[in-house]
Amino acid sequence: MNPVLKRAVDLIARFPGIGKKTAQRIAFYLIDQNDEFVEALAHSLLDLKRGLKICKSCFDLSEDETCRICRDQKRDHHTLCVVEDSPSVAQIERSGSYDGCYHVLQGVLSPVHGIGPGELRIRELLERLKSEEIHEVIIATNPTVEGEATALYLADLLAGTDLKITRIATGIPAGSSLDYIDDLTMNKAFEHRREV
């Protein structure tokens, strides 16, 4: 394989869910496109990486210091949904099942990978709960072993507070990611959340 093509295929294959064959198809597709499209794609990827920051309040991706969700006064600022990552926020938002604010942990507890509470945004969560008028915390981590362990850790940590602590319903299959959940299932998960 041509070295230029091989380099492109190798880089594209680093995307999650993209194998060598699909990467090669994408590379050949890009070769067939006009220069304007390929340049626009390259600029868009650079903008994506350089133009996004982490919201200082919820730790979701944002173009500004504070994200649009945290700035939106129409949202319920008394309810906080704790999620693992930004794709989870995007999926919940797409479903339209929730109108409160978020707190992105930026990961899950995983002792095998050396990720403990100190590597997540748990300290910042506790600070928010002290400084903001939060009434309910909805734990919406993925139903994986690590997601469940993180949910249990948070529930134990917040037990004994005046907060209502709930967990999204388990209509979401165990071991799955929120990124792949359809809107109806996401709506039902929020509708049937339970106290923990």
Image (cartoon, rainbow, N blue to C red):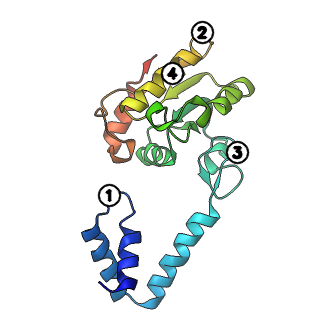
Q: CA distance from mark 4 to mark 2?
A: 13 Å
Residue furthest top as drawn: 160
Q: Horizontal and vertical percent for residue 13? A: 35, 66
Element under disc 3: loop
Q: Horizontal and vertical percent for residue 166? A: 48, 21
Left or right relative to 1: residue 164? right
The residue located at (33%, 47%) in the rendering is 180
The earlier-in-sequence mark between 4 and 2 is 4
Element under disc 4: helix
Question: Which one is nearer the viewer's eye here, 115 or 162?
Answer: 115
The earlier-in-sequence mark between 2 and 3 is 3
Considering only vertical position in the picture, is 118 above or below 153?
below
Q: CA distance from mark 3 to mark 4?
A: 24 Å
Q: CA distance from mark 1 to mark 4?
A: 30 Å
Question: Which one is nearer the viewer's eye here, 160 or 26?
Answer: 26
Left or right relative to 148: residue 103? right
Disc 2 marks a residue whose amino acid type is Gly
Residue 56 badge: 3
Element under disc 2: loop
- Find disc 2 in the rendering and name its residue: 160
Q: Are marks 1 and 4 in contact (CB under 8 Å)?
A: no
- Find disc 1 in the rendering and name its residue: 17
Disc 3 marks a residue whose amino acid type is Lys
